Amino acid sequence: MSRDSNYDHHISIFSPQGRLYQMEYAFKAASSASGLTGIALRGSDTAVVVTQRKVPDRLIVPDSVSHVFNITPKIGVLATGMIADCHSAVQRMRYEAADFEFKYGYAIPPAVLAKRMADLAQVNTQSASMRPLACVLMIVGVDEESGPTVLKVDPAGHYLPFKGT
């Protein structure tokens, strides 16, 4: 038995090497659960996301399987990973976008939405009562000030803008 085996039971306990094993498990689950490859690109006047459509069972209607979701009329997301976690993250993104528009009177910029989702993901790394969501979010949208935007949010709460990912 490994001497590190006692450090993977709780999210907020670091191993002697400074690792959070629960976060490593979330990253591995996010990359291997759906088995999808997604590409997001940003141009001078557009942002686009492309992915595969894998139907897990032949009894499922192929048109009902999708990992690309609309958040607002100008923001979309490609969510890869465990599908239940992806749906939870998309639902929370829609709530955050609607709440922002209600409070401030204009649509949420994609970078603000990505920061908010990264903050929520990072909170899951601190609390023992929640587990990190095993999904990676590639947010594409058009901002009124900066134009097309591509951002990526991972389970640990990192978010970065990309020209392509």
Image (cartoon, rainbow, N blue to C red):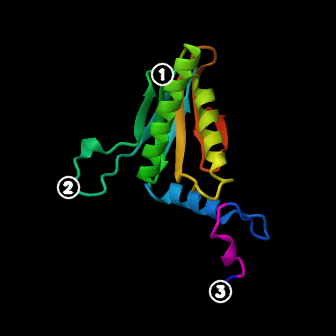
Highlighted range, magenta? 3-11
For residue 10: magenta?
A: yes
Q: Secondary structure at mark 1?
A: loop
Pair 3/1: label in front? 3
Q: CA distance from mark 1 to mark 2?
A: 33 Å
Q: Is residue 60 above or below residue 153?
A: below
33 and 54: which is toward the camera: 33
Q: Are marks 3 and 2 in contact (CB under 8 Å)?
A: no
Residue at 48% x, 35% y is: 77
Q: Residues within 10 Å of mark 1 (few under 14, many from 20)?
A: some
Quadrant in the picture for residue 16: bottom right
Residue 45 in view in this figure: no
Q: Which mark is residue 1?
A: 3
- Looking at the image, which residue is at 75% across and 69% down? 15
Q: What's the CA distance linking mark 3 and mark 1?
A: 51 Å
Q: Quadrant of residue 105?
A: top right
Amino acid identity at mark 1: Lys
Q: Earlier in the sequence, mark 3 or mark 1?
A: 3
Q: Which residue is mark 1?
A: 74
Front residue (pair 122, 74): 122
- For marks 3 and 2, give the CA distance: 42 Å
Question: Is 33 placed left or right of 3 in the picture?
Answer: left
Q: Residue furthest bottom?
A: 1
In the rendered image, residue 42, in percent from the top left (x then y), is placed at 56, 28
Amino acid under label 2? Leu
Tag shown at residue 59: 2
Asked if the magenta segment contains residue 134, the reply would be no
Q: Amino acid at mark 3?
A: Met
Estimate the x, y position of residue 44 in percent, counting from the top left: 58, 20
